[in-house]
Amino acid sequence: MVTNSANGKSLPPHTGNSSVAVRSPVHEVPLQVMVISSIVLGIYSIVGTLGNGLVILAFCMYRQVRTSAHTFIVSISVSDLLITGLQYPTGIASMIIGAPSLGEAMCPILGAALFFSIYVSLFSVLLIAFNRYTHITTSPNTYQKLFGPSKSLLWVLLAWVISGLLVAPGFLGYGEFGWGAKHRKCGMTDDNPYNAYYESNIYAVSYLIVFCLVAGIYLRIYFFVKNSVMVMAEANLNLANPEQYVSSRVVKQTKHMFIIFSVFTVTSAPFVLLHSIDSHRAFLPSEVSFLLIGVYCLTHVLNPFMYAWKIPVFRRAFKAIIRCKRQLPFQPGAGVN
């Protein structure tokens, strides 16, 4: 035990990710909470795995789907598939048995993979917003310079590398990945004194930065579209309907992005904010904590439906997959985003 000479308080010894695993006592979770959580996560897992899997399959099978903009949608689907197809099923089993479902040795790996997938998904949301902003507000030449096929892959690679760097502190002593008995899942352990700082200073701050950037980008898009309407209206005073001054497709995309950002905010912000506070000073009842986690988990299920299912070429690809067609039928006038 280490004593802090400043205040005389004893601090728990810190050994980082020690090879000697010390199991935290199993916390009792109300039966109704466990049953409801298992059912909800089971539904999330099935729907999310199918949705994200279809997006990835469509991108791999059909050339028409493989555009620069869609690369970022596939990136978010891959990271979300790791969550809905791996984390949710193993999480259900762990919650029921009260121990790591894949064993103690795999639990730190699952915990790190969970945070890594969340970071990739988060940065992919930012890349999609930035891509849409560039597509709407700049010239085609500028867009191609920033988001050509090779450049898009580099953006995705950068997002994955940064995500890996954000996970690294958990293996270097600033937090510890492993079995968390409080929520009965593989994520952060309960007994490392630096876990709260990792969750607030790295995870929550990363979320806050991305949130502010995405909000700023969508606001810039909104004001760009609004100003374009006003400028064109002044130049064409004889026309009555201002919406005809801007492409209806751009207006529709802007409204769609506002919906995406609203859903992203509602499903993720409450959990990140309250959990980062609760990790330092516990105040949330277990029922509320599980509810916030359940709403947050919905984010990775909704992403393929919010992004891909609204794009015509993806919908055509999904229909072709269901009908077992190896080629995507040609549709005159069908554009891609």
Image: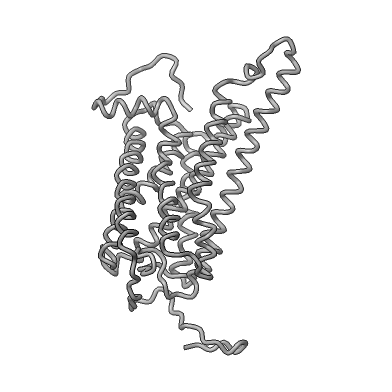
**184 relative to 307, above or below:** below
Question: Residue shown at 40%/73% (left/top)?
Answer: 17
Name the residue nearer the viewer: 63 or 192: 192
**Which quadrant would residue 222 be assigned to in this image?**
top right
Question: Residue shown at 64%/38% (left/top)?
Answer: 219
The reply to whether residue 87 is visible in this rendering is no
Question: Residue shown at 44%/38% (left/top)?
Answer: 73
Query: Seen from this angle, which residue lies furthest top?
Result: 238
**221 relative to 192, above or below:** above
Across and down, in percent, residue 182 comes to 39, 68
Question: Residue shown at 55%/39% (left/top)?
Answer: 129
**274 relative to 259, above or below:** below
Name the residue nearer the viewer: 247 or 9: 9
Left or right of 235: which side holds 244? left
The reply to whether residue 197 is visible in this rendering is yes
Across and down, in percent, residue 120 comes to 45, 50
**Which quadrant would residue 103 be assigned to in this image?**
bottom left
Q: How is the image coloured?
A: one colour
Left or right of 107: which side holds 175? right
Across and down, in percent, residue 92 comes to 29, 57
Across and down, in percent, residue 334 comes to 43, 19
Q: How many marks?
A: 0
Left or right of 55: which side holds 12? right
